[in-house]
Image (tube, helix red, strand yellow):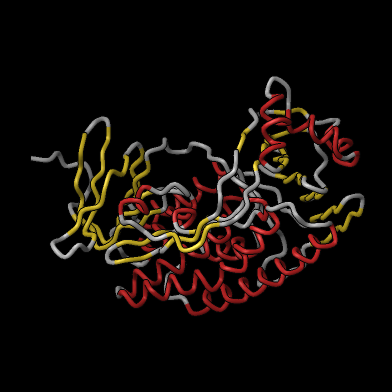
Amino acid sequence: MQTKVFSNDHYDAIIVGARCAGAATAMLLARAGQRVLVVDWAEEGSDTMSTHALMRGAVMQLDRWGVLPGIVAAGTPAIRRTTFQYGAQQIPLDIKPSHGVDALYAPRRTVLDAALVAAARAAGAELCFGISFRDVLRDAQGRVRGAVLASSRFGRIEVSADIVIGADGRRSSVARRVEARTNLVSRNRIACAYAYYEGIEDTGSHWLYLPRFAAGKIPTNDGAHCVFVALPMERFNSDVRGVLAEDPVAAILADEEPVFADMMRPARRTSEVTLFAGQNGHMRQCQGPGWALVGDAGYFKDPLTAHGITDALRDAESLAEAVLAGTGQALQAYQRDRDALSTELFDISDEIAGFGWSLPDLQALHMRLNTVMKQEQDWMATRQAETRIAA
């Protein structure tokens, strides 16, 4: 007889992955009275690679869900100014109030994910860490009816559920097991390196673009900035991987641009350098009989536009609404909404990641991106006004 590991033998939803997409989906479903099990192979509270930045839509949602105050209380600084720098030209922009948001934030993932996990638990979701996903369970008709899980302590565990949701990242095991189609793949990908630094003056976020090079500084927790460089793959291999004994982020910025070099001069690195060797973006089929995907599991675009967390939270709410509706048609509408909101963002991100632009071309791409983001925010504001999920 199988050892009883979880509180229930059957759940309304099993969610694989307890990062921002999975924890947010769990929180919303649990607040609506669903029995939700969330499993994650990682240790609770662990860090993960991230772009950090929350766009206005994400801040809107976190505020309405009651999660934002805890993130602010954890020392996440308000960002009220952002600067776009194209070559030597700097364009500072104040964050204008809109949709109830007058500042942006860029929390460490140890802060953001923990806040969403705590909110999911408070809503009644069951979260278990150190548990791996192995496969889905299917009925005689092939519909997903649960999950096969495993842990070093309990071994193989079978749990039934009305729906299994993959929130397990861009290399999603759930997507692979349900054989989700890949509908779009990007042409381009950037590679990047980032680290955390103390001693940089907080002037808001700053985004730098040069021919075949990009960088940025983003204020985050503990008085630190996340500073990154983004490069084509061939330069990443020579200029970043080749200088790991030093500080490749600071070294490259010192060579590239005097404004960033001046900003970095008083800085002290407080972390290891995180490397991302790049991955092509994808848009996968994100729903089927008894299963769904959310976050990077279903939709991953190049991180240079720093929009991944925002879209993950957007889709978490849209998916939760579809699950509560309880029909295949609602899940199909979830995918249609995701695709309609995401395809142009995906295409613009892909074009920017190609580094084939001139600086005037890039400014035009950023204007397009800003227009699409505003359309997304308007959609989210309307959806939030209509939602039946309790805050």
Left or right of 317 in this view: 329: left
17 or 73, nearer to the observer: 17
Q: Position of residue 318 (x, y in %)?
A: 45, 69
- Which residue sits furthest top? 245
Q: Which residue corresponds to the image point at 56% horizontal and 71% vertical from the top-left?
A: 341
Left or right of 363 in this view: 180: left
84 or 154, nearer to the observer: 84
Residue 68 appears in the picture as rendered: no
Q: Which residue corresponds to the image point at 75% horizontal and 64% vertical from the top-left?
A: 365
Left or right of 356 in this view: 63: left
- Say above or below: 16 vs 145: above
Left or right of 265 in this view: 7: left
Q: Position of residue 275 (x, y in %)?
A: 62, 35
Quadrant hosting residue 364: bottom right
Q: Which residue corresponds to the image point at 70% horizontal and 40% vertical from the top-left?
A: 226
Q: Which residue corresponds to the image point at 22% horizontal and 63% vertical from the top-left?
A: 143
